[in-house]
Amino acid sequence: MIRSHLIASVFCLSATVISSCQLIRADDNGPFKGPVSIRNSRPYNLLFMQFRPELPDIISPGQVRASAQLDLINNMLAPANYGAIKVLEDNEIDRIALSWSKGLAHKSEISFFVPILYRNGGVLDEIMNSWHKFLAIPATQDNPAGRTSFAPYHSNLFLTDSSGKVIVNQGNAFGLGDVSVSWKRSLLSSPRAGVAARVALKLPTGSSGLLLGSGSADLGVDLDIRYRTGRDIQWFANLGYLVSSGANPIPNMRKHMTQYVFGAEFASNRRDSYIAQIDGNSIAVWTGHPF
């Protein structure tokens, strides 16, 4: 399901610091800096593996790339009650994503990803309220009461089923998320175009009781594509498929999910780059609510 009002419900700020044991030359990807390394950060979707948006280019054998990324994610999803079903997602998630990659022989590389999660009341609620007022964003089906009807800086993750039974009732939580490892192999590489395939495995290292992990493993495959038109414009896409063994604490979780990233980048010079990007993936949990 694609939610047309997602921007009114989920907001993310991201900052990345990249370090390296053997620095990768700044001109390895020319003036291009995309794609934006971001993922669907709805609390239930964070329980499952999702491929990080990447180009198909492979780092050289023996070369190492490491990064630390901080995402501040503001979630607000509160549709009107549907019978006995109540959905409330009102929180902020601070996510530190640590990654380490090493180039291997035969045009391949291996990567490890370690997320650290803190679900809390956060600091962005009033900023988001002001942003909604400035843009005159109306109440939506996702949140018919509007953001300002909820007190700021709360941490609520609540869900009941059609009988009114409470399935999820979580507040703050902090800890390690689910660690994943991926292997990428270049299938085509030239200055103009590139194609690579990725295979990844997610391990259940996060606490399923605190909803920091699913409590089970996921397996996925992904295809990365890049095509450049001239020196200043590149097009990119990621197409992924995930098989999950479910989430222990929550019923009605999807076992098969798809993911896509489409984007274009214009590098006006070696310093400035403009990226238009859309990311989408299957909804992770069927709540029974028709919103």
Image (cartoon, grey):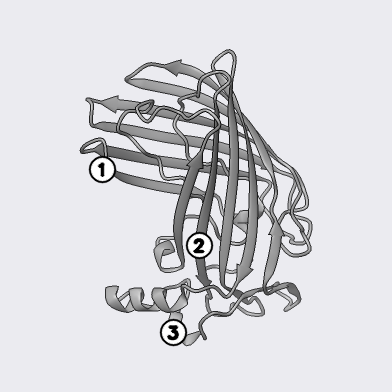
Residue 88 pos. (x, y %)? 59, 75
Per the image, label 1 sits on a secondary structure element best described as loop
Residue 182 pos. (x, y %)? 63, 33
Sequence-wise, the earlier of marks 2 and 1 is 2
Which of the 4 quarters of the picture holds residue 28? Answer: top left
Residue 130 pos. (x, y %)? 35, 78
Looking at the picture, which amino acid does disc 1 mark?
Answer: Asp
- From this viewpoint, is residue 214 visible? yes
Which of the 4 quarters of the picture holds residue 283? Answer: bottom right
Which residue position holds label 1?
Answer: 272
Left or right of residue 203, residue 58 in this image = left
Q: Looking at the image, do the residues carrying marks 3 and 1 touch, with CB atoms under 8 Å apart?
A: no
Q: CA distance from mark 2 to mark 1?
A: 24 Å
Which residue position holds label 3?
Answer: 148
Which residue position holds label 2?
Answer: 72
Please, is residue 154 above or below residue 36 in the view?
below
Tell me what residue is drawn at x 22 percent, y 36 percent: 269
Looking at the picture, which amino acid does disc 2 mark?
Answer: Leu
Q: CA distance from mark 3 to mark 1?
A: 37 Å
Tell me what residue is drawn at x 44 percent, y 60 percent: 13
Q: Looking at the image, do the residues carrying marks 2 and 1 touch, with CB atoms under 8 Å apart?
A: no
Per the image, label 3 sits on a secondary structure element best described as helix
Left or right of residue 258, residue 272 in this image = left
